[in-house]
Amino acid sequence: MSAQSAADPAATDANIVSTDNVAAILNSALYAGGGLLRLTPTWVPRSFLHPGRRIKLHPNDLYAYGGDRGGIDERWFGSTTEAANEGRVWNEGLSFCLFEGKRFLLRDAVSEAGVRLIGQDLWSKYERWPIYSKFFDNMGPIPHHMHQTFEDAALVGQEGKPESYYFPPQYNNVDNNFCYTFMGLEPGTTKDDVRKCLQNWNRGDNGIQDLTRAYRLKRGTGWLIPPGVLHAPGSLCTYEPQWGSDVFGMYQSLVEGRVVPWSLLVKDMPQDKHQDLDFIVGQLDWEKNVDTHFKESNYLEPIIDTERSGAGYTDRWIVYGRVDGRQLFSAKELTIEPGAKCTLQDPSSTSWITVQGKGQMGSLNLQTPAMIRFGQNTEDEVFISHEAATAGVEITNTGSEPLVGLRYFGPDVHKNLPQIGDYKKQ
């Protein structure tokens, strides 16, 4: 579908419910699902990256948006955030709900029934679902880049983007080409060192990775990445809960022989600052980049939530901690053994993706797909409304292997959120 259809997508696709007509089908879907909404796969391409081929998309569909748009290397979950891609289609990055063969945007659903879906507190403060998550899957590393702080993003009418990583074993059967991530800058690095790298942009490799260090990626662990911190994600498939924004600036000019255009460095900076090297360097959070204990400040290992675990099921924190003192997002991994069941009760709404096994969540089937065609619906993704989450949802493992699901949460919803480093206390 072309970008020109953005004003009235229903005019070109009879299965899409227009914004003005969402109320009736949303009420029916919430009633039938007991507060649960079935979501369909949301695929996002990146023109400057190389797909890692582990997110279950059929290999014939990796370039479904067209070769000029690049390969599909991301799947977004519970998203009301548009992907900031040049040439994007109208719905790129936005999640659809599915009910009785009809689709409607989760963004429209939240706008229509915000309190029911995300709770009074989130709706009153943000009037939207302010976070999302994704699978990020590449064959090799991507450029050393950062995401702007909230203050710097506001200069161009955007929001900042702190994010987090978790490396699910189920989606990482192979390492691909570079199972390491460069993060931050080597302590002792100066702003002039980075400025010189920017001056050398058109000389091939500008050498910024000479100023940083790489950390080996480990399945079943993760990282918290504050805004303004440089990072060059490696080749493990990554589950990424993050703030609902798609701002970034690439600070590396050459990756695996691929040239990174200057435009990707400055795309979310004021137009009059696109050649101001001091301003560009100044968008980095310097203290966090040169932190002498970077790993201790940002590394995550799962923590069992004993209050939410029981016989036959284990709930683990996989993303936790605070960004600049704020609880912005978090995530958990629930594992239910064959034949077991549990009542999942959370303090707020959450978006769920099944990564192993099959089962039942309320009235909805859960099934981890082996292969997905572009445009095909699946039974692995669910949005759990605030109403359903706080009341409790029964989940049953109906298969012969563990049923495993990942889910993420919005800001300020947990009273017992662990802090960075708490995994050492287990």
Image: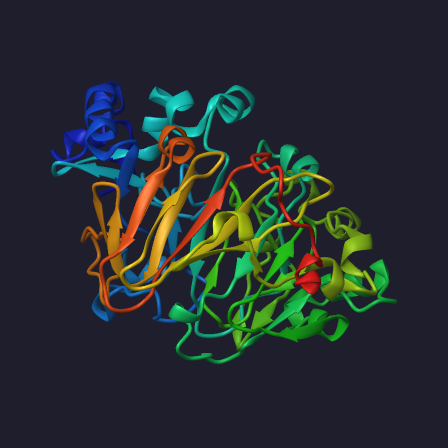
- Toward which corner of the image does residue 383 lie, by quadrant? top left
In this rendering, is residue 126 above or below 379?
A: above
Frontmost residue, 335 versus 247? 335
In this rendering, is residue 266 above or below 194?
A: above
Residue found at x 52% / y 68%: 220
Task: Examine the rendering and report whether any part of residue 207 can be seen.
Answer: no
Frontmost residue, 356 versus 202? 356
Is residue 9 toward the left or the right of residue 240 in the image?
left
Frontmost residue, 301 versus 83? 301
Q: Name the spot of residue 332 as percent of width and height, x first.
A: 49, 52
Q: Name the spot of residue 387 as percent of width and height, x first.
A: 38, 28
The image's colouring method is rainbow
Query: Which quarter shows the C terminus?
Result: bottom right
Q: Name the spot of residue 66 as percent of width and height, x first.
A: 27, 59
Label tally: 0
Residue found at x 80% / y 69%: 186
Task: Examine the rendering and report whether any part of residue 127 can be seen.
Answer: yes
- Toward which corner of the image does residue 291 lie, by quadrant? bottom right
Residue found at x 63% / y 55%: 224
Residue found at x 48% / y 63%: 238
**Which residue ends up furthest to the front in the rendered image?**
311
Q: Name the spot of residue 268 as percent of width and height, x first.
A: 59, 43
Is residue 334 toward the left or the right of residue 97 in the image?
right
In this rendering, is residue 352 above or below 251?
A: above
Frontmost residue, 360 versus 76? 360
Is residue 42 toward the left or the right of residue 205 in the image?
left
Query: Which quarter shows the N terminus?
Result: top left
